[in-house]
């Protein structure tokens, strides 16, 4: 929470860009994930994955600022200027890679596993769906493992200036469970945070509607703003975890 407040300027810009992306995605909608006959649309899946990566771009300065704040003690907009655009772009490449992997996982989840999870909750499972869910769980763990193994790349690029894959993986292996449990906890707490802010979202939408804004645009803006704020909070938590893992390894060596 301290880092979120210290970087409130960066967070505010990130949330504003997130709202802008959401508005543009409604004004200029892309292809749907499913065709009219219910079949999976490849173009729609690519569009959904690409949109997920686009949403991740405003979070790069937030994550970068959190890394700088933890590792170097500079916060806010000053943190973004500490290593110039070169440092931020070097940091951002790794984060975009993580966003692409998560986009693939989210798209697969939407296409394959949502229906199976709903059927499982209703007690209507068969062998094929059970195998598919087990496979999905294995893929999710594999993605988590890759993110954890390469998670300290950003911290290493900030502190050292370059991040060699072998060194990053070595730190990830030494601190695997330290990071894995914390990242899993962040992922699990996100739905709780979303549920907690729902009453507040309704109040803000009501206030905006009372001021003359139509209900649908007001809801879109408020939902996007709160989603962006929660995403910033989650990114800061994960960034702190990666930085602490890096510091643990640096202090041990």
Image: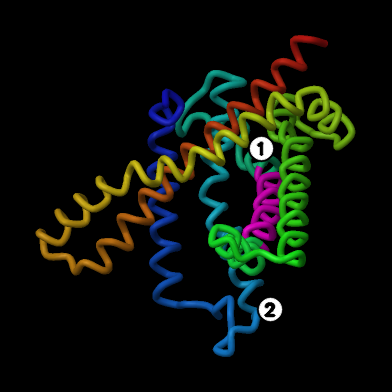
- Residue 101 magenta: yes
Tell me the magenta residue range. 92-108
Q: Quadrant of residue 171?
A: top right
Query: Residue 104's spot in the image, x, y percent?
Result: 69, 60
Query: Number of marks in the image?
Result: 2
| Main secondary-structure element of the magenta-colored stretch | helix
Q: CA distance from mark 1 to mark 2?
A: 35 Å
Q: Residues within 10 Å of mark 1 (few under 14, many from 20)?
A: some
Q: Residue at position x 78%, y 35% from top?
A: 149
Q: Kindly state the secondary structure of the residue where label 1 is placed.
A: helix
Query: Residue 25's spot in the image, x, y percent?
Result: 45, 70
**Mark 1 vs mark 2: in front:** 2
Q: Which mark is residue 42?
A: 2
Q: Which of 98/157 is in front?
A: 98
Query: Residue 5's spot in the image, x, y percent?
Result: 38, 29
- Give the residue at the far right of this rendering: 166
Query: Residue 41's spot in the image, x, y percent?
Result: 65, 81
Q: Residue at position x 59%, y 20% from top?
A: 72
**Disc on the earlier residue, 1 or 2:** 2
Q: Which of 51/133 is in front?
A: 133
Please identify the quadrant where the N terminus is shown.
Answer: top left
Q: Quadrant of residue 118?
A: bottom right
- Give the residue at the far front of this rendering: 123
Q: Is residue 200 above or below residue 215?
A: above
Which residue was labeled with disc 1?
87
- Left or right of 29: which side holds 204? left
């Amino acid at each position: 929470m301290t880092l979120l407040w210290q970087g409130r300027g960066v967070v505010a810009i990130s949330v504003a860009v997130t709202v802008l992306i959401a508005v543009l995605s409604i004004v200029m909608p892309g292809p749907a994930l499913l065709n009219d006959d219910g079949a999976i649309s490849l173009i729609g899946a690519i569009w959904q994955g690409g949109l997920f990566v686009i949403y991740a771009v405003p979070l790069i300065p937030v994550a970068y600022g959190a890394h700088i704040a933890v590792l170097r003690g500079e916060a806010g907009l000053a943190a973004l200027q500490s290593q110039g655009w070169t440092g931020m772009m070097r940091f951002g490449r790794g984060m975009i890679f993580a966003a692409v992997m998560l986009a693939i996982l989210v798209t697969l989840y939407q296409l394959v596993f949502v229906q199976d999870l709903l059927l499982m909750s209703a007690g209507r499972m068969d062998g094929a769906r059970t195998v598919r869910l087990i496979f999905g769980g294995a893929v999710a763990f594999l993605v988590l493992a890759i993110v954890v193994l390469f998670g300290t790349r950003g911290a290493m690029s900030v502190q050292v200036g370059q991040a060699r894959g072998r060194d990053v993986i070595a730190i990830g292996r030494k601190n695997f469970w330290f990071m894995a449990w914390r990242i899993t906890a962040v992922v699990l707490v996100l739905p709780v945070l979303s549920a907690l802010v729902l009453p507040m979202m309704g109040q803000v939408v009501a206030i905006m509607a009372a001021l003359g804004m139509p209900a649908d645009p007001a809801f879109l803006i408020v939902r996007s703003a709160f989603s962006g704020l929660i995403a910033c909070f989650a990114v800061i938590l994960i960034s702190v975890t990666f930085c602490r893992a890096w510091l643990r390894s640096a202090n041990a060596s």
